[in-house]
Amino acid sequence: MCGIVGFTGNREAQGIVLDCLKRLEYRGYDSSGIAIVSKGSLKVRKSLGEISVLESHLESMPGNTGIAHTRWATHGKPTTENAHPFLDCKEEYALVHNGILTNYMELKEQLIKKGHKFTSETDSEVLVHLIEDSDAPDLKSKVLSVLKKAEGSYAVAVVQKGLDEIVAARNESPLVIGVGHDENFIASDTTALLKYTNEVVPLMDKEAVRITPGSIEVFDLNGKPVQRAPAKVSWTLEDAERSGYPHFMLKEIYEQPRAIHESLLGRLDGQEDDSIFQEQITSIKILGCGTSYHAGLVGKYIIEELSRIPTTTQISSEYRYSPVTESKPLVVCITQSGETADTLAAAREARKRGCKTIAITNVLGSAITREADHVIYTRAGPEIGVAATKTFVTQLIALYLLGLRLGAIKNTLSSDRRRAIISDMRALPRIVQSVLNEASAIEGYAKKYKCAHSMFFIGRHLNYPTSLEGALKTKEISYIHGEGYPAGELKHGPLALLSKDTPVIAICAADHTYEKMLGNVREVTARDSPVLAIGTEGNQDLSKYAEDVFLVPKIDPLFSPVPIIVALQLFAYYLAIERGCPIDKPRNIAKTVTVE
Ligand code: AGP
């Protein structure tokens, strides 16, 4: 995954594109580059490392049109040569690309035979040489002719020497157009543009756009004009900035009470459109990757509890290759970004199999919203930190809401139970805030356990997936190996790994599994592993079993994953702080994975 931006207007482009680019750094940060067009010239500068390194090397580059790129290597190592933008042989065009071209080797060989000289190992560079090679009359037609030859995914932007315009296109990689006054933008993500505009035009797959300071023309790959009105996003610049927090991850953890509140607004009064549920729903399949998959695993318990509809959860990339069965479940695709390639492919596969699909996503107009029959937005606001936090919690909220609606349709909830559930959901922001108020206690446990090489996270029932998510957060942010496990399974193998050097984080929610969890804690302490038990207020007896105890406020066990995961997010965050890890940009991973 990489980030691209472009600007054309009456102001100097250099500062604006770099400013926007920095907001995309979460998408990739191994090298970056910029191209600026001014009358009669086209300058490109690139550098290895983060955008600040590029910036520190840059001279002033006058010009009103520019494109820039921050890279996350897929083809070719992170080097200055492999950084974007790429120039053609005559240095007439500069191009940035996010995605993967599957037929680039074949195209490259043809271009080399024609005498083109390549300077990088990337797939992207072929596009700029193809543009140079095209005999179409103008930049727009050249780009369109080239994209007809390109196979694979792309968000691409091109500028030409001396021209104040940008031609851009997308296929399976995100790209939005930002609408300004006498200036226009393109970017991989709306958050990059919020300082300058909140009016955006989403670009769809296999569409292109030509922007000048005063115009935006969207068209399909045959050059046929497409009419699309701009939409206003409600996110503000403050939403997309750190607001005094040392890291986006911490800011986003602390935004959870508000995110939950907003995700519930107007959705508890039973006025939602139920047209998607007209057909008989006999089963549900939830699909997602990473954290979104974990939300889906919790979702299985929620939906079965509230509506009694049999539900399974599957990893998106596994679903695609599973056999087609007779049944046509309602398919729920969870993806915070709405751009994860595996989940998009799974959604397409589900439709091919004749299933109705619902998308749960955080990003307005993202690719998944065009693949699904119905969309539920999570309203978490922009999430910049690579580790998903508030989007996970709001995905759970969306699943509780879905469970409630299905429960109403299936008539599985008494009015008292429904009222109690709604009242518990309304209490969630306050409950999460109470956990956040105790962050210093969690910080203390992180200091104690910071030297561990490996940890187990155990739980039962709907807190088994919570344990998986706690382990994932710990792995990706603190680089400590964390393994989530169903507590009942420890004795079937993993106990062999336990010792005094292997802390175990035991989720002991006050539900029907509590006594069994105490048994598991005993099993673990007998192997000398230190235990941090996460329990519920009222279960003070936990301290008799576990060395360390953190209690979250009392709530119906159905909602226990919400406060518990907030505690585990803080634990992972403070472990990472103690170990000096780059929290918002962990090594080797990217926020949105647009390759399969
Ligand atoms: C978790 O912290 C990661 N960011 C990752 O597992 C993520 O949840 C996964 O890549 C899926 O992303 P999506 O929700 O945007 O589809």
Image (cartoon, rainbow, N blue to C red):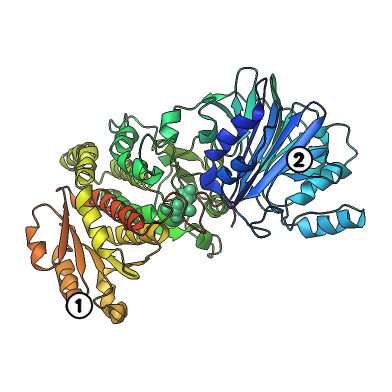
Amino acid bearing label 1: Asp
Q: Residue 138: x, y in percent?
A: 85, 31
Mark 1 Cβ and ligand 1 under 8 Å apart: no
Residue 197 disc label: none
What SS does tag 1 mark?
loop
Within-10-Å neighbours for mark 1: few <14, some 14–19, many 20+: some
Residue shown at the point (75%, 37%) measured from the top left: 43
CB atoms of marks 2 and 1 within 8 Å? no
Residue shown at the point (85%, 59%) measured from the top left: 109
The answer to whether residue 117 is left or right of residue 536 is right
Name the residue nearer the viewer: 191 or 368: 191
Residue 94 disc label: 2
Amino acid bearing label 2: Ala
Nearest to N terminus: mark 2 or mark 1: 2
Residue shown at the point (27%, 79%) measured from the top left: 495
Locate the C terminus by quadrant.
bottom right
The answer to whether residue 353 is left or right of residue 144 is left
Work out how far the residue at label 2 is from the one at label 1, CA to CA, in angstroms.
Answer: 61 Å
Q: Residue 188: x, y in percent?
A: 59, 39
Q: Residue 97: x, y in percent?
A: 68, 45
Residue 46 at least partly seen: yes
Name the residue nearer the viewer: 366 or 131: 131
Residue 528 disc label: 1
